[in-house]
Image (cartoon, rainbow, N blue to C red):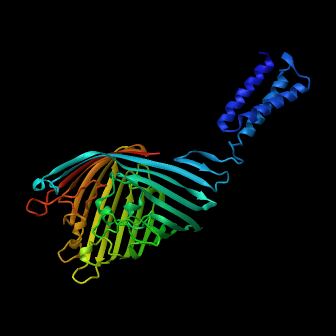
Amino acid sequence: MNKMNFVVAAFASAAAASTHAQEVSIDDTLAQIRAEIAELRSQGIDGSAWLTQERAEAIRGVVQDVLSDASTRQSLQETSATGGWKDKFFLSSPDGNYTLDIKGFTQVRWAYDSRASVNGLTNGGSEDTWGFGVRRMKITFEGTVVDPSWKYKVELSYISGDATVDDSWVEKTLATGLSLKVGQFKTPFMRESLAADTVTLMLDRSSVDGFFSSGRAQGLQLNWLSGDVQFTAAYLNAFEVKSNYMSSGTTRNLPWPSTKTSQYAFAGRMEWKPAGKWAQFKDFSSARGEEFGMLIGLAGEIEKKDNAQGVPAMYGDINPSIMAATVDLSFDFSGASLFTSGVWRSIDPETAGYATANQFGFVLQGGFFISDTVELTARYEYGDADSNPNDITPVLNTLNGNGYSIFEAVTVGANWYIAKQRVKVSTDLGYAFDGVGAFANAGNGFLADGTSSTGAFDQGGQVLARMQLQLIW
């Protein structure tokens, strides 16, 4: 092979490799290189004497021009989009108006639960339950369209064996700090529920949150943020109550004409941050070196049920009105954190013969870092479903299978942040002092206790041990 062929082959190989990296047309790049070399030859340059230092510099310039041109192209595209990884996988148009962020996480859990009695066993005997499970697996697509003021989000989830669509909404920024959201999203009520699944202090949210949280709903929401104050208000089809006597069932994917489960449903939340930054309150921990922060939250909701939702047909047409309120307080202490919340809910059956049920609960939890990556955690929680004989709630005990209205539990644990929240191993041990009924939450881990052989409610405690690996990608 003469020098001419060797150089052409070398330039072709280099250009082809670069072209492949940039996903441009290999044939076009080779053709351009060959054309430039043919031009040099047409000037009478040939044979072994053609590659002088001056001509070598000229060819290097040709190759640089070709590679520069290649770097501005994408395969089968007219413009140069960007993509890659920066805390998440992303794609973006050159002007940044059209974006797509792709992210997700998996939580693999092992749990052990020991109950004093379980319905269905001989004489209400005790039972130990344990095993592995994928607690949550979610993938999220979010970004902007048209311009950065138009945002969207779609979140798909696989939770304890059920696949569903969690979030599906569009949000428009109307002015600085003011936005309007429409679609399916979390209702603005309990702070534990509003925080992401990946940033809970213990392995999961409290059982009190599971009982009082109104879940997700479909509707529209207005959010206003100015300095240290944030206010959110929502008008919704209905609240999706997952773990209480007045279960609404699902409010997702409703058919048209709508079979919404409420005549009306409104929710609102206000937050004031007298110290710290908003970003640090996305989770419930405070890493070493983080500045002091304080957040106060206040929220309320009101709903008028429809279609006798959650009420067995044998008890007639009961469409209760529901009011609820919650207040929470969060502190970050640079290596330690503290969170407490209280919640109250009133269920008025508006039907003769049944009294109003007043339910309440509170949570106190905190964490302390003993090193840069290891955090010790603890939680105390108490809830009362108010199952008094004349209340509406005993009428609906068939939804739970027993009558344990009081829930009291303490949990201690630890988090090991291998790569901050991205790779985290958590473990905890919980104990419920009495039988678990209204506050039972299979996803959380505390299971419903049964009755004794005499039919009385068994008052034995319940032990729950959990360990979980979390991976965010």
Residue 38 appears in the picture as rendered: yes
**Nearest the eye: 20 or 179:** 20
Query: Is 438 on the left-hand or right-hand side of 283?
Result: left
**Can you give x and y, in whole percent of width and height, for residue 50 in the image?**
85, 20
- The quarter holding residue 319 reads bottom left
Query: Is 354 on the left-hand or right-hand side of 52?
Result: left
Q: Residue furthest right?
A: 44
Image height of 469 relative to 237, above or below: above
For the point 65% across and 51% down, which residue is it? 93
For the point 72% across and 31% down, which residue is it? 15
Query: Is 167 on the left-hand or right-hand side of 241?
Result: right
For the point 10% across and 63% down, which residue is it? 455
The number of numbered badges drawn on the structure is 0
Q: Quadrant of the N terminus?
A: top right
Image height of 268 relative to 85, above or below: below
- The quarter holding residue 398 reads bottom left
